[in-house]
Amino acid sequence: SDLCPIGYYCPAGATVEIPCPSGTYGPSEGMSLSSQCLECPEGYFCEAGVGNPASTDALVTADDVKACRPGYYCPAGTQYATQYPCSTSGGLATYSTKRGLTDQSQCSVCPAGYYCPAGTSDVTQYICNAGHYCPAGTSTSTQYPCAAGTFYSHRGGTSQGDCVACTEGHYCLEGSSSPTACAAGTYNPVTGSDDSDDCLPCLEGYACPQPGLTTGTGTFCARGHYCDAGTANSDDNPCPAGTYTTSYSLTSMDACTTCPDGYGCAEGSTDFDDECETGYYCPAGSATTTENACAAGTYNPSTAMYDVSHCLPCTVGYSCAAATTTPSTACPEGHYCPAGTEEGSEPECPAGYYLGTTGNTALSDCIECEPGSYCLAGSASMTQCPVGTYASGYKTESEGDCTECPAGYSCSAGCTDPVICEAGTYSAAGDSTCSTCEAGHYCPRQGVTDTEMTANICQAGLYCPAGSDSTASYASYACAVGFYCLEGTTSPTACPAGTYRGSKGGTQESDCHACPAGI
């Protein structure tokens, strides 16, 4: 059978070889006991199943060599390559560039300007960070920050002495790699500041628009504005509407000047150049040139007015809306306008009157409504009473005040007095015309009503054609020969065939006689 391979031992009866444990090695073939595995020599590390860790056999590659690696040390019995890193010893971080170290004491102290984490073999990978310094033996990048009030902008610092005082206009927190500028609205005239609280508010009357200023008088305050302490921009704080300032150094809102009478001052105004507009008045402190409109019923033709008393009563014959500059709306028809009349609220001529012209000034200008017409309040013209009615007097106020035309008369539109119906005609109450007396009736006089016409029935034996204008009588309306006429008939009835009527006035069919024999 094959010999147990180097780095392993094979007890009697074993079917597989067993590796020498970590921290030991098997120096030869054919070992059968674990006690034959030897302790790994110092300066080397032995993983499980390793042969001679210091082998120089030509077949063994450089990676197979188990010599302790740079940055670490390997006492006897070391089990793996990174088991014992060069680390802090006596408060100082260490490193190593050599292979095969056997003890921590062989590790070198980390040089100044660098920091060495455990296991460091190349310090150039760990140059000290900006904002910090690294004396010899530094273990981490942030172990030694520059003190507050100082900064260091380079890498590789070795002591606090490399950190320089914070510059004017700035402050430096602990570990700063560069100064932090004081914010806009502040300044800092000294070096070595360690907190933002060291930045002072910009002086009153000035603005500090850039970060990092060293004086509190960065720029003048803008006209129309004020700059209290800590103002960043010259136009941050406009004087409120209704005030102004021409100054470049105003320090508070209370210092803004009140806009004078007759002017309007918008927010941030630098002067009071804007006069109050016509139609308006602007008392002191007005924000706009249209601050207060003259009320309806008044007007103002001038600029720069400042009191309500400057609004004048609207001229007679005109009406004025709010903010009117010159009366130009003539009083409308049907209305009159005394001084001070509001547009849209012009007094109306009362019912029973009208006014067909514009520009009227008084109630006395209103004209009485004439007979035959009515006039609602505010009428520009008369309205005729409708057909079937009449108005005989003046100042009729509404259609309902027009009187119904009486029966026996006619009333056309605009009627002033009813017109009596002629004989042969009639009418009912409210009729606009007289109607022809109906056939079978008679209307013997003027002014016959519909009731009278209905009652005036032509008697039997008489025939009254339409329009009959006299009392029914035999002399006037006798039924014709050959006919008979029933009472109220609308037309005579001829005697039947085989009969005849030889005289007028037949009243019924029996008044027709049988024709004689032979005729």
Image (spheres, rainbow, N blue to C red):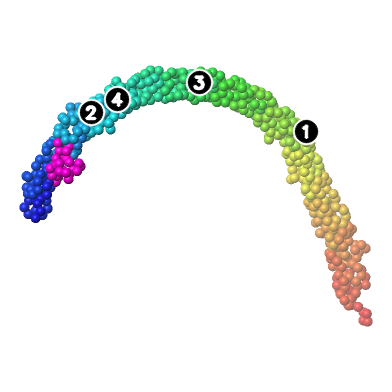
Sequence-first disc among 2 and 1: 2
In the figure, is residue 140 to the left or right of 516? Answer: left
x and y, in percent, of residue 349 in the image: 74, 36
Name the amino acid type tagged 4.
Answer: Gly
Question: Residue 143, position in %: x, y?
Answer: 26, 28
Local SS, label 3:
loop
Q: Which of 159 and 272 is in front in this view?
A: 159
Q: In whole angstroms, how far apart are the C-alphas of marks 3 and 4?
A: 44 Å
Of 439 and 126, nearer the camera is 126
In which quadrant will I find the C terminus? bottom right
Residue 58, above or below 188: below
Q: Name the residue under label 3.
A: 221
Label number found at residue 110: 2
Q: Name the residue under label 4.
A: 157
Please state which amino acid type lies under the numbered disc 3. Answer: Cys
Main SS class of the magenta portion in the image: loop
Image-quadrant location for residue 295: top right
Query: Of marks 3 and 1, which one's residue comes earlier in the chain?
Result: 3
Q: Is residue 202 left or right of residue 12?
A: right
Q: Mark 1 points at which residue?
A: 365
Amino acid at pointer 2: Cys
Which residue corresponds to the image point at 68% horizontal and 24% vertical from the top-left?
A: 302
- Identify the amino acid type marked 1: Asp
Observer-side mark, 3 or 4, equals 4
